[in-house]
Image (cartoon, coloured by chain):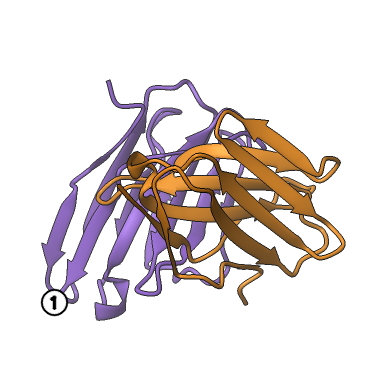
Chain colours: A orange, B purple
Amino acid sequence: DQQVKQNSPSLSVQEGRISILNCDYTNSMFDYFLWYKKYPAEGPTFLISISSIKDKNEDGRFTVFLNKSAKHLSLHIVPSQPGDSAVYFCAARGPNNNDMRFGAGTRLTVKP
Amino acid sequence: DTAVSQTPKYLVTQMGNDKSIKCEQNLGHDTMYWYKQDSKKFLKIMFSYNNKELIINETVPNRFSPKSPDKAHLNLHINSLELGDSAVYFCASSQTRSGTQYFGPGTRLLVL
């Protein structure tokens, strides 16, 4: 029962271009969404989040967009840098502080 | 000065053994978690715990048990290890149950 889905297991972009990572969810009760970044042999690190009352949140090169009607969110990285190469996990949580549900991750490779 | 640490980093053991993984956080957080990352790379919550409440994911076998000697530690005990327990186990903590979670580096468990 995967309530959070990241359908692209991998993505490759050129340095300086935009990276767009996508995430879909099925549970309409989710009201808080997060992106985590994970390097090999390390734990996931928090990147950016968005509440369901917003449709966009920006932090430097990272912007998360939320489309509630489509139950879809995306992470934009502009400009992409080689150091951004990692696995990106989308996560979602419900209003009762229910446990977070994670997607399977998308491996981003930024080529110099 | 690691915020969330886990020991050991690698654990190789025989089927049927009992083992423990330790987790410590120095962030002063109230809530700690254990996640399992399976072979398909999904991160799944196993337990969430603060000094008031332990929430157990109902899919977790009762061979797994969390033990919290104090607020800064949440250890994971596994009895009668099975081949299917092989996975990466992540500990995490957050200020409150609704706060951003910070992850440890993971413990790679291999059951032979």
For the residue pair B57 and B80, the one nearer the viewer reads as: B57
Residue B62 versus residue A109 in the image, above or below: below
Q: Judging from the image, what secondary structure is the residue with disc 1 in?
A: loop
The x and y percentages for residue B20 are 25, 52
When the figure is inspected, residue A31 is found, relative to residue A6, above or below; the finding is: above
Q: Looking at this view, is B98 or A64 the one in front?
A: A64
From the viewer's perspective, tell me whether residue A92 is left or right of residue A31.
left
Percent x, y of residue A78: 54, 40
**Mark 1: amino acid:** Leu
- Residue B104, given in percent of the width and then of the height, sits at 35, 40
Tell whether A8 sits left or right of A5. Answer: left
Report the chain holding disc 1.
B
How many numbered discs sit on the rendered protein? 1
Category of crowding for the residue at label 1, using alpha-carbon neighbours closer than 10 angstroms: few (below 14), some (14–19), many (at least 20):
few
Res B13 → quadrant: bottom left
The residue sitting at 44% across, 46% down in the picture is A37
Q: Residue at x 68, y 48 (%)?
A: A33
Q: Position of residue A9 (x, y in %)?
A: 45, 70
Q: Quadrant of the N terminus of chain A?
A: bottom right
Residue beneath the point at 37% across and 34% down? B73
Could you say which quadrant of the image residue B38 lies in? bottom left
Residue B18 visible, this orientation: no
Q: Residue at the location (31% across, 55% down)?
A: B77
- Asked whether the viewer can see residue A35, the reply is yes
Q: Which residue is mark 1?
A: B112
